[in-house]
Image: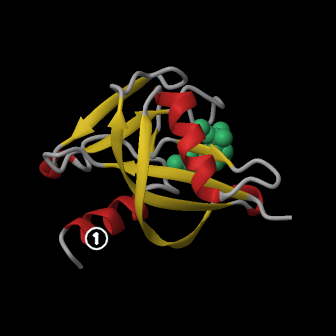
């Protein structure tokens, strides 16, 4: 069985990236991540991405290019991340402690979860056209 977590690298019209601060579990609380979560059994990755953004942020997103492939997580899970744009709604922290839109020079101003940090670099490279 696939153990897949999907994450959204949501970028706005000004090139800012949405970062979300985890509320739980205690060992991850306070760390910043790409919003998202576990793919349900039988669910398509992109469907899960859209569902998670609705549940966690209250927005409708459209997914674009994938950022890399399978990024390692704990317990045999992998994280798959897509660039995404909000097509409806304003993001609200429904399950997170806080949200921040990070401008390009602010990308490392938050303590990203260790698993997400290399993906931030990959997102940056992808947005720079590399
Ligand atoms: N996780 C790590 N980085 C992320 C996401 C969305 C998730 N960007 C890790 C944290 C949890 C697990 O994956 O241990 C499942 O995530 P969730 O369903 O609790 O959001
Ligand atoms: Mg989640």
Quarter of the rendered image showing ligand 2? top right
According to the picture, the residue beneath numbered tag 1 turns out to be 126
Residue 89 locus on image (x, y percent): 36, 27
Circle 1 crowding by C-alpha within 10 Å: few under 14, some 14–19, many from 20: some
Above or below, comparing residue 114 to residue 95 in the picture: below
Colour scheme of the rendered structure: secondary structure
Q: State the SS at label 1.
A: helix
| Residue at position x 40%, y 22% in the image | 92
The foreground one among 7 and 45 is 45
Above or below, comparing residue 1 to residue 46 in the picture: below
User: Is 59 left, or right, of 38 in this rendering?
Assistant: left
Position of the C terminus by quadrant: bottom left
Residue 7 locus on image (x, y percent): 52, 51
Residue 31 locus on image (x, y percent): 47, 37
Position of the N terminus by quadrant: bottom right
Above or below, comparing residue 129 to residue 112 in the picture: below
User: Is 35 left, or right, of 4 in this rendering?
Assistant: left
Residue 126 locus on image (x, y percent): 28, 70
User: Is 39 left, or right, of 2 in this rendering?
Assistant: left
Above or below, comparing residue 99 to residue 83 in the picture: above
The foreground one among 26 and 60 is 60
Query: Which of the 4 image quadrants contains residue 82?
Result: bottom left
| Residue at position x 49%, y 54% in the image | 114
């Amino acid at each position: 069985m696939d153990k897949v977590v999907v994450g959204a690298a949501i970028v706005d019209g000004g090139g800012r990236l949405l970062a979300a601060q985890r509320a739980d579990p205690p060992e991850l609380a306070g760390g910043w991540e790409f919003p998202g979560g576990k793919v349900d059994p039988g669910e398509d990755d992109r469907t899960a991405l859209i569902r998670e953004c609705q549940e966690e942020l209250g927005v409708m997103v459209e997914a674009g290019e994938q950022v890399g492939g399978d990024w390692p997580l704990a317990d045999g899970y992998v994280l798959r991340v897509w660039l995404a744009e909000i097509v409806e709604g304003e993001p609200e922290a429904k399950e997170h402690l806080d949200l921040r839109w990070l401008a390009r020079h602010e990308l490392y101003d938050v303590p990203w979860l260790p698993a997400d940090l290399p993906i931030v670099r990959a997102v940056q490279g992808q947005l720079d056209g590399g």
